[in-house]
Image (cartoon, rainbow, N blue to C red):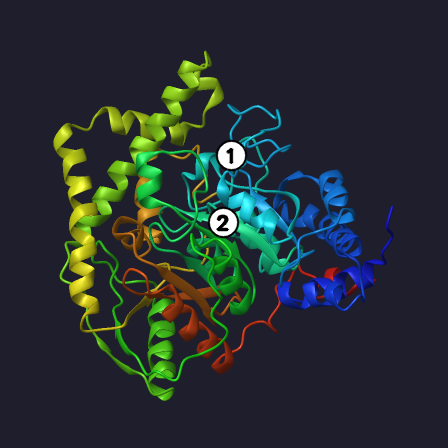
Amino acid sequence: MVSIRRGDAFAIGALDAHDQAALVARGEVTAAELTEAAIVRIEALDPQLLSVSWPAFDLARSRAAAPLPEGPLAGVPYLLKDSLDYPGLPSQAGSASRSTAPRDVAHPYVRRLDAAGLVPVGKSAMPEFGLLPVTEPLVGPVTRNPWSPAHSPGGSSGGAGAAVAAGLVPLAHGSDGAGSIRIPSSACGLPGLKPGRGTTVRVRGRHVIEDLLVGDSLMARSVRDVAAGFALARPAPTAPVKGPSRRRLKIAYASRTLAGAEPHERLTRALEDTVNLCARLGHEVRPAWPAIDGPAAERAEQVLWSHIGADCVDAVIAAGQDPAVALEPWTRALGEIAAGLNHADLEAAYGQIAALPGQLATFFSDFDVLLTPTLSAPPPLIGEMSPDRPADELMARMFGWCGYTPLQNMAGTPAMTLPLAWDAAGLPLGLMFAADRGQEDLLLALAFELEAAAPWTSRWPQISVNGGADGRAA
């Protein structure tokens, strides 16, 4: 077995995916050593974070020891979200209803990751079936935010966000159906892209609501890693965005959530600071909001969300399991909410999916980008949105905190959160940039510019490879 010192493993973990891959390309380390370094970091730091739900170290070592495809990310270790099927690994999706039997399916998305030479070292933790914006499944593990272990890293890709922010791995898969890439990216201090509808190859089996709402991408600490992760999954081979554009943009900004609420005062100040930063960079920035029915869009997301919960309940019953035993209270409650809806509710939800793309296209004919906070408040304390809380309380807290992100899921448009602010307690606060269909590259180019103007990659959380006693100990 390859051996690597903890100090060396931590030093490698402070590099982004491109720089780690460059070590392999130059022959300074092997892919096996890069993989072993990630395993050392996971074993050293993850007991404090609980971001990895299923280690796959033997699989990783075997893959890293074999010849890998060539590419700019070849040899780089990464985590799969625990709902992403991968041959030889289980897909528990944070639920006691799922077995630990390995899957044998490989949809085109994971085949692309394999073709890029990436090395999976395990599965990342998530809430049950991704139905909450925190990562506290009753089956475990309850994932901690590396900036403050008393706080949530967000969800549903919370294990991915915590692991990448801490430097356990430079890349981790995330999926976003109501903000589930952008939420943990914001809470963990990462840039996080939610691609628009249909801009990646197929990630999972067919499901009409998930196909409409969910976008997948790789989460990372640097914009160039995010750009490369998005490019490798596009249906047609495409070179990733490499840097900022000289084009000056027309940026609209707004502070109110879809429901019309104002955010926490720290987010208001963060938005103002970001508006001023964009203006100093030469962009035209002014207040504006699309001509949409925000509450109707949020209600539509809630209706479809409850139907996903109902699908989970139905699947458990079909498998001969008792939902009261196999599923969390929140998942069961969503099923009950769906049972109380009528055809008009579902028609209204699909009506929003039909109407919003055109309404946003009209808005984006006047503006290039819409800027808002990513979330309405800083990351919550562990337990504030646990799945055993009353359902009406959880519904209000979830969509109150995630009051901005569902719009792009409903409309199928791209959006990207950037870590441009921190609160007085040292917790990250994301600002979200959204654009029209097909404008992911525009968002990435802007992200490159803002990353250079307000760098974040040198900031490390408390629990990380570069974060105090835990991180520096060799």
Q: Looking at the picture, tell me which residue is in the foreground, 340 or 364.
A: 364
Image quadrant holding the C terminus, namely bottom right
Q: Looking at the picture, tell me which residue is in the foreground, 468 or 182.
A: 182
How far across and down, in percent of the image, does residue 7 sit? 82, 63
Where 330 falls versus 213 (above or below)? above
Residue drawn at (27%, 67%) of the image: 255
Q: Tag 2: Cα neighbours inside 10 Å, few (<14), some, or many (≥20)?
A: many
Where 367 falls versus 174 (above or below)? below
Q: Tag 1: Cα neighbours inside 10 Å, few (<14), some, or many (≥20)?
A: many
- First in sequence, mark 1 or 2: give its number: 1
In-image side of 35 versus 17 (left or right) = right
In-image side of 101 versus 25 (left or right) = left
For the image, the number of numbered tags is 2
In-image side of 291 versus 15 (left or right) = left
Residue drawn at (26%, 28%) of the image: 338
The label on residue 93 is 1
The amino acid type found where label 1 is placed reads: Ala
Where 99 falls versus 425 (above or below)? above
The label on residue 209 is none
Which residue was labeled with disc 2? 174
Query: In terms of secondary structure, where does tag 2 sit?
Result: strand
Image quadrant holding the N terminus, namely top right
3D distance between C-alphas at marks 1 and 2: 12 Å
